[in-house]
Image (cartoon, grey):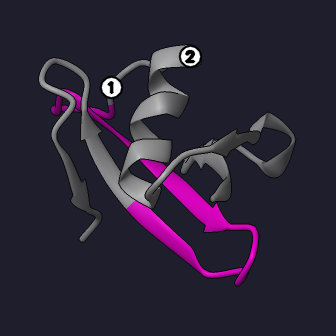
Amino acid sequence: MPYTVRARHLHGHHARSLDEPSPEAAAVAYLEDFGHDPDEDDEAVAVIVRDDDTGREQCFRVDLETGETRPCG
């Protein structure tokens, strides 16, 4: 599926289009290709993943050491 992914703290012009099987996979692939510094006091980065087919957006926190992905919140 096509997804558009960006770090939560960045604006849309930093977004990247990725073709991945799930939104979680798109979040991890984005950070593998375009590394970011972790959020304060954490080893994770929050990213926004938009499903290009439905327009639905989801926020995920990706642990930079383990690749573990969980919903923001």
Foreground disc of the pair 2, 1? 2
> Which circle marks residue 53 in the picture?
none
Please state if 33 lies on the left or on the right of 31 as rendered. right
What residue is rendered at 50% in x and 45% in y?
26
Vertical comparison of 33 with 61: above or below: above
Front-most of residues 37 and 23: 23
Element type where label 2 sits in the image: helix
| Residue 6 position in % (x across, y down) | 63, 44
Q: Amino acid at mark 1?
A: Pro
Q: Position of residue 14 (x, y in %)?
A: 78, 35
Tell me where residue 22 appears, x and y as whole percent: 44, 58
Magenta-colored span: 39-59
Sequence-first tag of 2 and 1: 2
Disc 1 designates what residue? 38
**Front residue (pair 43, 32):** 32
Q: What is the secondary structure assignment of the residue under circle 1?
A: loop
**Location of the N terminus (image quadrant):** bottom right
Residue 43 falls inside the magenta stretch: yes
- Point 56% across, 16% down: residue: 33
Residue at x 48% of width, y 30% of height: 29
Q: Which residue is tagged 2?
A: 33
Which residue appears at 16% of the width and 18% of the height? 65
